[in-house]
Amino acid sequence: MDSTSTQPRLLVVDDVEDNRSLLRRRFTRLGYEVLEAADGAKALAMVSTYPFDLVLLDIMMPGIDGLEVLRRLREAHSEVSLPVIMVTAKSASEDVVEALLMGANDYISKPVDMEVAAVRVEMQLRRKFAEDASRAAHRELERTLAGLSEAVQQAEHRAAILPEAGADARGPLTGVLGAASVLTRVCDTPELKRMIASIENARSLLDRLILDSVRPGAMDRRERPAYRRIKVLLADSDVDRRTLARSVFADAGVPVEVVEMASGASAAETAIDRAFDLLLINIDMEDGLAAVKKLRRREAERTQRRRPILALSSESRTGPAALDAGADLHAVLPISTAGLLTALARALRRESEDLTAAA
């Protein structure tokens, strides 16, 4: 069984073969990958072995019934990580109430109204995928912060032992320090805030070291070098989404210049001849994927530095295609503020690493 399928994977659990077959056929036509389990024991074994996005679970089954299956599932999976929709007879209202209290996400009644079932499944999957994207952004944020902490420590040591480098020492640090400023806007846990505080303290010390080496007495005037303007290319045919992204960057705490394009073709042409720290490309546009491929091809032809690309789309299933085309990251719309700023911080950190390697 291929666990890398881009189709949402459903598990249908019912002891009646006709019921399973009906749901499998209907949801397969809607673009889902559907697997079946004829009893509770098999369902639990399948969930423990393979990843599923949602379970359609019959309540009335011989042996291990639906309520017991639900109880065991909730011992290992939250309501968000594995949504469970109960399938029950209309007369079993008490069982429905008990199932909901035990952690079921929703229920549908037999005979199944497929339009209602399809909508309820889609709603639960949207919530799950949005939460998955949020957790992924948070993990990426933690990795970025860990890398920033290490990079700042190394840069602090370099600036301290090589004061004669003066202002030139700031070049490789620009991305690191700019990324730290961006991340202060999205850190909302004590651990992450402590890491950011450490970076900010190191940044202040570095500013003082560099100023003192360049102009004795500058520290007394409490001046700080200005960070360069960060350049972002935003390609999206939707005006409202471009406006929202621009407002997020406006609140990032560092100067960000956003260049907007309404098509993939115009974005590709612009990015080929101009330097950008981050490219945001909506691959739902007709020429979005083509733009990513064209950029990567032209970079290779011109031996240019690889530009960080964040691909955006409305469905998680398009992520593999975006990465295959050459994108560095993929995010499902609507993207969170944390996700957007984390992508920017990651791009800045990578630039600082590239500059340090070239120094």
Image (spheres, rainbow, N blue to C red):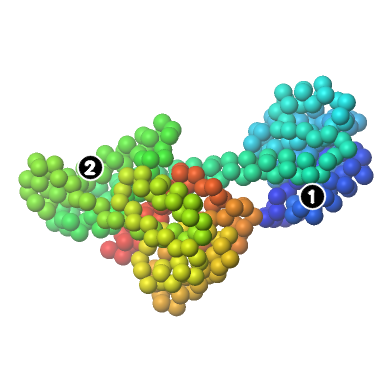
Q: Residues within 10 Å of mark 1 (few under 14, many from 20)?
A: some
The amino acid sitting under disc 2 is Ser
Give the percent coordinates (x, y) of residue 189. 43, 33
Give the percent coordinates (x, y) of residue 162. 18, 54
Between residue 93 and residue 201, name the one nearer to us. 93
**N-terminal of the two: label 2 or label 1?**
1
Quadrant containing the C terminus is bottom left
Q: Which is in the foreground here, disc 2 or disc 1?
A: 1
Height in image: 202 above or below 91? below
Give the percent coordinates (x, y) of residue 82. 68, 38
Q: Residue at x 45, y 63 (%)?
A: 261
Q: Quadrant of residue 64?
A: top right
Give the percent coordinates (x, y) of residue 34. 79, 49
Q: Residue at x 83, y 41 (%)?
A: 113
Between residue 102 and residue 206, name the one nearer to us. 102
Marks 2 and 1 sit apart, C-alpha to C-alpha, by 57 Å
SS for callout 1: helix
Between residue 355 and residue 318, name the one nearer to us. 318
- Report the residue that reaches farthest toward the bottom: 301
Residue 222 is left or right of residue 290, and the answer is left
Residue carrying label 2: 204
Question: Which disc number belongs to residue 27?
Answer: 1
The amino acid sitting under disc 1 is Phe
Question: Which disc number belongs to residue 59?
Answer: none
- Report the residue that reaches farthest toward the left: 217
Q: Is residue 41 visible?
A: no
Quadrant containing the N terminus is bottom right
Residue 215 is left or right of residue 352, and the answer is left
Residue 253 is left or right of residue 111, and the answer is left
Height in image: 239 above or below 50? below
Q: Residue at x 88, y 38 (%)?
A: 111
Height in image: 132 above or below 287? above
